[in-house]
């Protein structure tokens, strides 16, 4: 959950010299950034350094990051004619830097550590494509879903097609598993999630698994959706910090679960971090099929020392 990034002084130093997209697109730089947390904290798994918004950028929506702010799209998706310009083959050619980054990172970490690839879920990508920027409630995207369901379905299925290709390319380049980030999934009702999001996710799972990759799905604020994910053939479910571990375990007895400490816990005093970690480890029970992680991205204000405290508590 943002294992590499701004909470690390080494990352901030490198970003002084290189733009964000430049780091993603250069395999040496992306590997260096992905290795920073591995060297500093010795995590068991490494995640490729990239972003979910590489897909809309490759489709021609023009994604930039304003300084210290969220993403901005120069050509957001507002009408059906835009979809006629989307071309999966052309987008995949632009996206070769992603599997290249996975390949370079695999060379750097060896085979002892797990390597994760990732992409955004079609619904979450749709949110950014339509809104053209970050938002708390993505109204435009939700209105488009309600008002133009056919356009939305077409866009979601095109996004699913490219996302599946991108994830399969990462598996071929050496990723053991891929994580799908549905950061805005929680905005949908169960009915809407089943109608719009699940078919797109199902087609992605089938293609990744046919390529012998494992799939982990993260749905932020998705507690009300968890029972509806049961029919999806995902190998693992990554839990938002609000979901009680035990309720997820009873829903998914045979799958891997990942999570789910509140990332803001890392801004608390050491003793509170230790107590919260112990509590969560207690909930995890026998640790079988369990991956300790944060319940969402680590925030830039996190001191590295807090990560040391957390890891020591888990490992002991
Ligand atoms: O180490 C890792 O975890 C891999 C790198 C990674 C990034 N983004 C790098 C990044 C991953 C897994 C992501 C996923 C991502 N990106 C998501 C899904 C997960 C989540 O956080 O919910 C989303 C929604 C995005 C879109 C995105 N990228 C936004 C909204 C922003 C700007 C605001 C923010 O949170 O920083 C980014 C930029 C971004 N992606 C940064 C990093 C390290 C910061 C860029 C910088 O260096 O200035």
Image (tube, grey):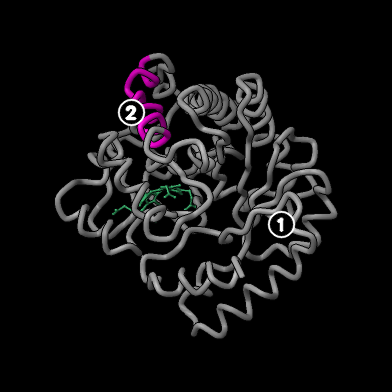
| Residue 223 is inside the magenta segment | no
In the image, is 55 to the left or to the right of 310?
left
- Residue 87 lies, in percent from the top left, at 40, 16
User: In screen coordinates, is 309 left or right of 7?
Assistant: right
Residue bounds of the magenta highlight: 90-106
Residue furthest to the left = 17
| 47, above or below 167, in the image | below
Circle on res. 132:
none
Vertical comparison of 22 with 244: above or below: above
Crowd around label 2: few <14 · some 14–19 · many ≥20 (10 Å): some
Where does residue 94 sit, x and y in percent of width and height?
32, 22
Q: Nearer the viewer, residue 43 or 177?
A: 43
Q: Which residue is mark 2?
A: 97
Horizontally, residue 261 falls left or right of residue 81, namely right
Residue assigned mark 1 = 223
Q: Nearer the viewer, mark 2 or mark 1?
A: 2
């Amino acid at each position: 959950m943002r294992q590499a990034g701004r909470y690390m002084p080494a990352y901030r130093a490198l970003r002084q010299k290189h733009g964000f997209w430049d780091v993603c697109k250069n395999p040496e730089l992306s590997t260096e950034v992905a290795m920073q947390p591995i060297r500093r904290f010795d995590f068991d798994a490494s995640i490729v350094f990239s972003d979910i918004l590489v897909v809309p950028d490759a489709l021609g929506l023009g994604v930039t990051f304003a300084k210290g702010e969220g993403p901005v799209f120069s050509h957001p998706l507002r009408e059906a004619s835009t979809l006629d310009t989307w071309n999966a083959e052309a987008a995949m050619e632009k996206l070769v830097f992603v599997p290249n980054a996975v390949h370079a990172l695999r060379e750097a970490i060896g085979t002892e550590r797990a390597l994760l690839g990732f992409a955004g879920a079609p619904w979450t990508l749709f949110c950014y494509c339509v809104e053209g920027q970050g938002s708390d409630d993505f109204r435009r995207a939700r209105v488009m879903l309600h008002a133009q369901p056919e356009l939305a379905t077409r866009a979601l299925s095109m996004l699913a097609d490219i996302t599946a290709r991108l994830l399969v390319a990462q598996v071929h380049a050496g990723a053991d598993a891929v994580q799908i980030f549905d950061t805005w999934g929680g905005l949908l009702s169960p009915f809407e999630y089943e109608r719009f999001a699940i078919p797109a996710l199902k087609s992605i799972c089938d293609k990744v698994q046919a390529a012998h990759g494992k799939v982990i799905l993260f749905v932020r604020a998705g507690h009300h959706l968890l029972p509806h994910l049961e029919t999806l053939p995902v190998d693992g479910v990554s839990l938002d910090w609000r979901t009680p571990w035990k309720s997820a375990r009873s829903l998914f007895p045979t799958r891997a679960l990942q999570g789910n400490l509140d990332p803001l816990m890392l801004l608390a005093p050491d003793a509170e971090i230790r107590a919260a970690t112990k509590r969560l480890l207690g909930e995890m029970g026998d640790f079988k099929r369990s991956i300790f992680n944060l319940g969402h991205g680590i925030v830039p204000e996190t001191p590295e020392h807090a990560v040391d405290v957390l890891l020591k508590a888990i490992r002991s």
